[in-house]
Image (tube, helix red, strand yellow):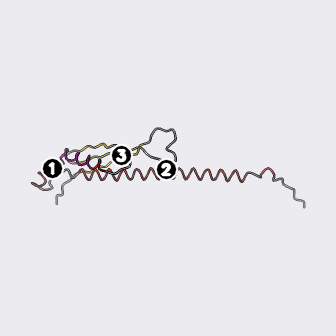
Amino acid sequence: MHTPKVDHSEDAGSILLLGIGFIGVCLLALAVITDASSAFIQQRSLQAQADWLALAGVQGLDLVAYYNHGATESTRLNADNVSSIVQGNFESSQSEERPSLRLSSTETGVYVTLTAPLRLTFFDSLPFDPIEVSAAARLDYRSFSG
């Protein structure tokens, strides 16, 4: 039996090209994973700050009613106190990039929304419209009846 000879001279650079393509795909995947992780961490940080501001805002109880009657259904939040407490805590926060704050409060709840531009490591310089990340927190005051 005679085995035919195969000419491998045309296949000389195909492994190198495949290796370079594989490295490129790995680098692109690494960039996507890094930026997705960065976006997730920024959103979690913003959520923690929104939760903290909502908790601080509930300290704006109408203290006169609270001290006279205790924590009853008639105890309400003082909107002016809530606003000044939240604004004061927001301004004193040591955030590297200050998000925008939207605050609303009622007699029974505090609603905080924070919005900030998303900072990406690799894809930030691409010519896209700015992407924003936001977080919202709501805390309702309810008396303990028990």
Question: Which residue is under mark 2?
Answer: 35
Q: Which comes before the other along the chain, label 3 or label 2?
A: 2
C-alpha separation, residue under disc 3 versus residue under disc 2: 20 Å
Q: Secondary structure at mark 3?
A: loop
Q: Which comes before the other along the chain, label 1 or label 3?
A: 1
Nearer to me, 89 or 7: 89
Which residue ends up furthest to the left in the rendered image? Answer: 68
Q: Quadrant of the N terminus?
A: bottom right
Q: Secondary structure at mark 2?
A: helix
| Identity, as a three-letter code, of the amino acid under mark 1 | Asp
Question: Which residue is under mark 1?
Answer: 62
| Identity, as a three-letter code, of the amino acid under mark 3 | Arg
| Identity, as a three-letter code, of the amino acid under mark 2 | Asp
Taking the spot 25% from the left edge, 52% from the top edge, the residue there is 56
Q: Secondary structure at mark 1?
A: loop
Q: Position of residue 87 (x, y in %)?
A: 26, 46
Query: What segment is highlighted magenta in the picture?
Result: 76-88
Pair 3/2: label in front = 3
Taking the spot 38% from the left edge, 44% from the top edge, the residue there is 116
C-alpha separation, residue under disc 1 versus residue under disc 3: 30 Å
